[in-house]
Image (spheres, coloured by chain):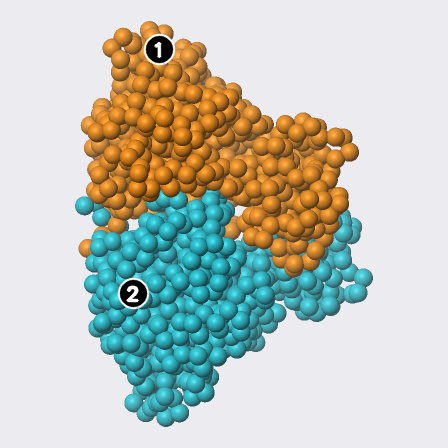
Chain colours: A orange, B cyan
Amino acid sequence: MSPILQKDDRYNILFEPVDIGPVRTKNRFYQVPHCTGMGHLRPRAESALREIKAKGGWGVVSTQETEIHPSSDLSPFPEQRIWDTKDIPALRMMTEAIHAHGALAAIQLTHSGHHSPNLYSRTPPLSPIDQSVDFIYPKQARKMSKTDIKNLRLWHRKAALNAKAAGFDIIYVYAGHGMTLAQHFILPEYNNRSDEYGGSLENRIRLTRELLEETKDAVGDTCAVAFRFAVDELKGKDGMQSHEEGRAVIEMLSELPDLWDVNLSDWSNDSQSARFEPNEGYQVPFVEFVKGVTSKPVVGVGRLTSPDLMTSLIKNQTLDLIGAARPSIADPYLPNKIAEGRIDEIRECIGCNICVSSDNLGVPIRCTQNPTIGEEWRRGWHPEIIKPRVNKKRALVVGAGPSGLECAMQLTRRNYDVILSEQSDYIGGRVLFESGLKGLSSWKRVSDFRINEIRQKTNIDVYTQSIVTPELVSELEISNIFLATGCHWRSDGIGRSNRQGITGLKNINVLTPTEAINYQYSPEESIVVYDDDQGYLAGVIADHLSSAGHSITFVTPASVVSPWTQHTLEQVRVQASLLNQNVKIVPNKTIFNANNGVLNARCMYTNRTSNIECTTLILVTERIPDTLLYAQLKEIMKSENNINLQHIELIGDALAPGLIADAIYSGHLAAENFEEPEIHIQQALYAREITSLI
Amino acid sequence: MSPILQKDDRYNILFEPVDIGPVRTKNRFYQVPHCTGMGHLRPRAESALREIKAKGGWGVVSTQETEIHPSSDLSPFPEQRIWDTKDIPALRMMTEAIHAHGALAAIQLTHSGHHSPNLYSRTPPLSPIDQSVDFIYPKQARKMSKTDIKNLRLWHRKAALNAKAAGFDIIYVYAGHGMTLAQHFILPEYNNRSDEYGGSLENRIRLTRELLEETKDAVGDTCAVAFRFAVDELKGKDGMQSHEEGRAVIEMLSELPDLWDVNLSDWSNDSQSARFEPNEGYQVPFVEFVKGVTSKPVVGVGRLTSPDLMTSLIKNQTLDLIGAARPSIADPYLPNKIAEGRIDEIRECIGCNICVSSDNLGVPIRCTQNPTIGEEWRRGWHPEIIKPRVNKKRALVVGAGPSGLECAMQLTRRNYDVILSEQSDYIGGRVLFESGLKGLSSWKRVSDFRINEIRQKTNIDVYTQSIVTPELVSELEISNIFLATGCHWRSDGIGRSNRQGITGLKNINVLTPTEAINYQYSPEESIVVYDDDQGYLAGVIADHLSSAGHSITFVTPASVVSPWTQHTLEQVRVQASLLNQNVKIVPNKTIFNANNGVLNARCMYTNRTSNIECTTLILVTERIPDTLLYAQLKEIMKSENNINLQHIELIGDALAPGLIADAIYSGHLAAENFEEPEIHIQQALYAREITSLI
């Protein structure tokens, strides 16, 4: 918030107020509903997270999809809930936190239909037709009767009234992501009813129309009624298309909602990762027609982080409001930064979908770029502000990968004098390596953002090609050292499915992931990528090398390629990409031995052995933390004549290899906890929300 | 509790008290720790469930594995938690409920090591060595330092003291199921340390010994200290074996714990389903040596439901205490029934592992045999007692499958006069069909139990070969009708992956699951089992037919056979069984067309088409509820001249096809709710535990 910075007038349009039915948002920054893995289970954490968005300048802050009835029960996933008045206090806590900073609060009322298996409530799921639940469970939803439809409308109305009582300003009807009953009624795939709710499009949108009308009738005097609608399913003519029925729906309901929130379906299409959709604003071609069909304000999304693009979308009359889920997670202060002319301080979303993965796992949201998201309540973290230094003055951070960069940056924010030392020629560590792989170039934003901030600081010195030894530490007379020394990939085959390692590896050419990328392969090579990590990296490497023209066999003990990427909504695209490049996939096999030109593998089910042709084996299994310097310094610290070393701490992959998000978080945690009283650290570690006993 | 019934003296030995360290259990019935999907998230439900066990006569009632520290965080799975004193009130509520009925309360303190990915706490998982977390996430646990080990011991000691403060009588140290740090240290697979905690067995059990000693020191004055230990991993010499190190561990620690709770590892071996391990007492051969090695009492498990076997295990000095998890879920009153001479009233566990599935899904426990489990708090249900009838006197139940049987049985308990009508020759419905399939014979207990009870009632008439029509209903002058008319399998190919159905089916021989079993296949037939249900049934049918000598191709849009069975811990055994019988498995394919002798399939990833040879296609896709009679009666009810029909209700698969457990639950729910005020029904539907805001 340096006083010399000012808003660029070019962006003034983004800060105009917009009327949405009976309410008015102060600007065009609209945080659309997104999940957090907190919801009704963690109301204080949810509230604190939404409050940060309001503080950061978003004109509208939405909570996540909100179950309106026990027949729409998404347990074990903790979405939001408004089954009855018992949920109001938690929701009111959130709306008050949002209102305190001048933002509007929005709620997305949801009946999930056959998408909710009702594993807690045990009531039969509802659907326009008899069909399987959208969950691997041999259980079906039942076709709704007319009475069921009437009840649904009553539940929705009651939920709208309760939402108004909880203080929400904008109340959604929701037909998107393939996940809601209103949408299921609209789509012929799920609706072959012969009554007035099926058949023609007019009939199929009847339920939506009723929900919109009844919501307006119930709460429209003081609340805006928004409609979130997926205009296209990216299925071609097998599904909704934005130039066919997608457009027709909007034409038919054009003036009914107070706001159109338009996007793509299903979730994997709406929240496409940068790996498979690198373009910001990728939803524009599908939704740009909407403003031509309605006079109501329109909000759209598509990983929008550039104020120039935002401005042009408004000026071109493509959108009225700039919707954001992921960009608002990566940078809750994005609107304020634009307002204050601090464009280069925007922490841009990298499109990695780690945020999505946490919701898919039913745990609080995480972000690679913003380690403070989800930690607002538990740890009191803030994306922009960190406590000042206490007594100590200097710190050395060894290693300029993601955890070292984050730790060093935060220490400079705390006003320590920092030395950041990197042994290689370049800053960025694994981020440099991974962002060089096919589809991951946006990941470089992780190091770019931090390098940019560090460059502007006077209290940090950065050294590359610098090997830190105990002797150097002693010379520097630095007492406080953070070791972000990283890790290296194993080359012995030890991994998830095989703790003994692969025998006979001397018989073939073995490469680690880092070696594999720049290796000069000869044309006659049989290259096997072996994935006993089962994360994302082996799939990326196979894709990268295959795209470079190499013929690849992908062997994994898992049943699918990169099973972890199911959580980031990428798995189908990952495996399709390999198959489309004719990568040979060998699932369900663990490799235990290598011979000349042949690997011996064992079936994960039967233990039957088989052979796989191979001359070069790329092992993506486990990683070994690089902790030599840490061990050396610890020894010195323990010795009686140590007069210098006070704080030695491993961070990032050197502490425990994980995702880049884990490394950033680890670096941030270390910087936050430095000089913090142990009792505070412990309190935060144990902090949790617990179930009421009364 | 008929007064003429008395305990059979043969079983007296089961009701002897047993001293366990400083405490004494009143009998030998010991409910070992098992998960419920409730834990710290649903403390009142957990407490009510455990209380029912105590009421039912179990001498010891244990809660589930209990996290002792944020570094052992199993989120999103709601196990039990004793991170600090904040958890004591919920735990004390449970121990008081258990004590109120004369039982001892036990708690299994757990540090999960690398089995807990710490997705909430975000602290790096701990392990004897650097290795991947036991969860598909590219994240590793870090090798514990000596300081970490000291801390772990302090956490365990503190948890033991807090457990004592919460009122527990028996406090566990836990080394089982492949899920705990104490066990990871014992197993060479996870421990190649070179310090005093690795190497020799003496070193590898050092941590366990310390935990046992320190727990005794902390709470041993008033609490017994139990040790749960997996003596065998069923991996042969690649793992722990009961005649090798399994025995050695017990010899070395023999007198240290107050109680030995011995079983198999991992969880899928301990909780083997009846499908793959039909024998009650299957763990006996592995644990029978234990009593020869220690003077301390020994508890063992293995789906024990027969009082004769239990008695012989005690008399033969195989065990001192009869451990049970699943049998105590299927019948919480098992001990009381033996005590009261009501052996034939025992609701025997069928070994289906639906209970396990609910924990694996993070939702409250369910049971096929006992629909009341998990509903004690929410609905006030009791496995033995149901409210008496109100005003009405008679009811007709149409269909004697699982939901009809349960509904009719419970209505007779409520003292209604019941007619149960079944159109086929036999009672049991789908239970009869499914229990005739390979591995599922124990499932027949579902109908056997209910038929046995109904046979002894005077207020029910059962008719087979009886077709109920609206005219018959009118003749019978019955006003209240429960329609358990079931469902039938689709034969058009509509299913999860294909809502249009399969074209060209007239070109080949199509069979539904029920038709497939008794069909006379000719030797030259190419039989394809197509699983677009993705539950368990298609896998069972393929296994059944393959065992009968037929050559089978198994096609599924899923990546594995029967993915649902991952939740019942059976998937690996299911797929291995098919592969070992040379069933050809074609994953990731949806079938869209049939030609003469050939199916056309499409890859789920690439949409590429391929052909699969087939002359007979067995379709396991979706089911169509049979609701004709319901529709007819509803019409009559609506007509103005209806003077008779008052209550018409669909239940079970006729309402919404699901598991047998769902059908039983549906029948039970209908019987419980009959004549209940609507407001009570609604209260139960909305009942849930919510998070404290203070």
- From what the image shows, is residue B693 above or below residue A333? below
Q: Secondary structure at mark 1?
A: helix
In which quadrant will I find the N terminus of chain A? top left
Name the foreground residue: A393 vs B72: A393
Mark 2 = which residue? B215
Badge 2: chain ID: B
**Residue depicted at x 21% and y 29%:** A391
In which quadrant will I find the C terminus of chain A? bottom left
- From what the image shows, is residue A641 above or below residue B370? above
* Mark 1 neighbour density, 10 Å: few (under 14) some (14–19) many (20 or more): some
What is the number of callouts on the image?
2
Mark 1 = which residue? A11
Q: Secondary structure at mark 2?
A: helix
**Residue depicted at x 60% and y 50%:** A501
Q: Quadrant of residue B169?
A: bottom left
Q: Amino acid at mark 2?
A: Thr
Q: Amino acid at mark 1?
A: Tyr
Q: Is residue A654 left or right of residue B393?
A: right
Q: Is residue B344 left or right of residue B375?
A: right
The percent coordinates of residue B453 (x first, y second) are 41, 80
